[in-house]
Image (cartoon, rainbow, N blue to C red):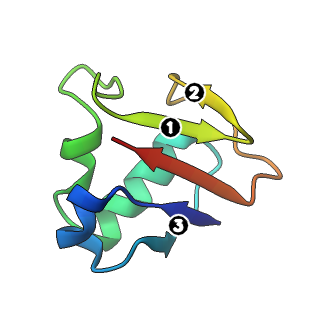
Amino acid sequence: MKVLIPTPLHDYTHAPRVEAHGATLGELFDDLERQFPGIRFRMVDEQGRIRRHMRCFIGGEQVFDLARRLDGVDEVLIVQ
């Protein structure tokens, strides 16, 4: 699926949109980390929660739970 990456993290991805995969938001972040080492720590804290300054949107809905299923999702927006 397509993932919109916030501008401050373009140093990792070198692109505003990337492709990543996962059945859950957490797995999607794991795939981003596999492709772009170091990026996950910028989005997820040591307790496994989305950092307060980050926002994730799926289908226009803000999501806070890394266990959120991504079945049928075409795009995830990550903003700062």
**N-terminal of the two: label 2 or label 1?**
1
Residue at horizontal 24%, vertical 19%?
47
**N-terminal of the two: label 2 or label 3?**
3
Which quadrant of the figure contains the C terminus? top left
Three-letter code for the amino acid on which mark 2 is drawn: Val
Q: Which residue is mark 2?
A: 63
Q: Which residue is mark 1?
A: 56
C-beta proximity under 8 Å, tags 2 and 1: yes
Q: Indicate the secondary structure of the residue bearing disc 3.
A: loop
Q: Label 1: few (<14), some or many (≥20) within 10 Å?
A: many
Q: Which residue is mark 3?
A: 20
Figure quadrant of residue 25: top right
Which percent across, then down, holds residue 14? 27, 80
C-beta proximity under 8 Å, tags 2 and 3: no
Three-letter code for the amino acid on which mark 1 is drawn: Cys
Residue at horizontal 57%, vertical 27%?
63
Q: CA distance from mark 2 to mark 1?
A: 5 Å
Three-letter code for the amino acid on which mark 3 is drawn: Ala
Q: Indicate the secondary structure of the residue bearing disc 1.
A: strand
Which percent across, then down, holds residue 55? 43, 33
Q: Indicate the secondary structure of the residue bearing disc 2.
A: strand
